[in-house]
Amino acid sequence: MLRRKHACLNDDWTCEMTPCNIVRPCIRLVPGLTRHSNLILVQRLSKIAGLIAALALLAGCATPMPRKDDPLESFNRKVYKFNDFADRAVIRPVAVAYRKVTNPTSRTLISNFFANIESPITIANDLLQANFKQALKATGRLAINSTVGFLGFFDPASEMGIEASATDFGVTLAKWGVPDGPYIVLPLYGSTTLRDVWRLPVDGYFFDPLSIYSRTHDDPLNAQYLPTVSYLVTLRSTGIDAEGLLEGVFDPYVFYRDAYRQRRLYMIYRGEPPMDAIQALQGAGDLDDADQLLEEQQQYEKQQQEKSSDPHAGPAAH
């Protein structure tokens, strides 16, 4: 069924490239930050030490079931169209140009570098989730890749069996029982939920070294924002490889929405969501709705086949 096609997606195709890492002994290993910026990062972390201790004492709250409704769909579709226009007009061409002047090997090295820099986001949220084993593992990745891996350009930690596992403040809220709330599409950002949107100010202000660097520096020509912009370009570049998933999709908005929800579900449960959560997300009982979506998809694919087989037909609209 169409819903199951959406559920077959996993983290990999739209990976946000933010593995993880942070703990005071390793702060100085974060590449690209001055001593002053690292000190600020330590100070930010010290402010939440009490919160971490409090969370560790709380009993584990049940993670709420994911929502599949879309009460803001009318608004979301308008923002989605705007984002799609902005992407086609500006963002994607920049990412394509980046791919033209780089090769796969150099892009991998650059992505590794930024993933290593952004790793404090995951370490901090592992601590907030009282997941100390994962926090220690992520800290080990940061230490190894920042030293043996030459500032994170290489990933010897993965070769040693220490795999990356991304998390953020939205996942932290889910772990402590906060429901996801309605699905939201934000201008120039994209998919999120009322719960997940809080990772933007919290992770961005307290844990993100790139954000801290841009906020605490005043370089000529606003060059302090260049690392963040470069990181975003690398993220969009990786998304180009997944654009083939949209070929033949009847409703890209629904595709992105369902893919986002599925990806977040797998992040919350670290790749192993329980069956009841998967069924709740897919709407296993809503057979009429699923059959309608499947019928629409089949009609769309039939129309595309007829257009491609008709030599007098114009090109299909995208």
Image: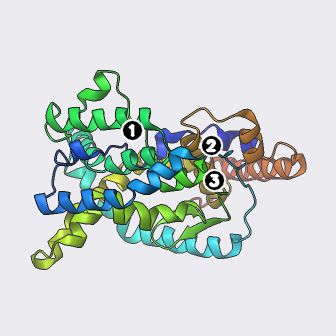
Percent of width and height locating residue 189: 46, 67
| Residue kind at label 3, given as amino acid type | Phe
The residue at 35%/61% (across/down) is 47
CA gap, disc 3 and disc 1: 33 Å
Secondary structure under badge 2? loop
Q: From this viewpoint, is residue 229 visible?
A: no
Residue depth check, mark 1 versus mark 2: number of the one nearer the observer: 2
Q: Is residue 134 left or right of residue 60?
A: left
**Mark 1 or mark 3, which is nearer the start of the sequence?**
1
Q: Which residue is mark 2?
A: 60
CA gap, disc 3 and disc 2: 33 Å
Residue depth check, mark 3 versus mark 2: number of the one nearer the observer: 2
- Examine the image and state in which quarter residue 217 appears: bottom left
Percent of width and height locating residue 91: 36, 66
CA gap, disc 1 and disc 2: 17 Å
The residue at 29%/34% (across/down) is 141
| Residue kind at label 1, given as amino acid type | Ala
Q: Which residue is mark 1?
A: 135
Percent of width and height locating residue 172: 52, 51
**Mark 2 or mark 1, which is nearer the start of the sequence?**
2
Q: Which residue is mark 3?
A: 255
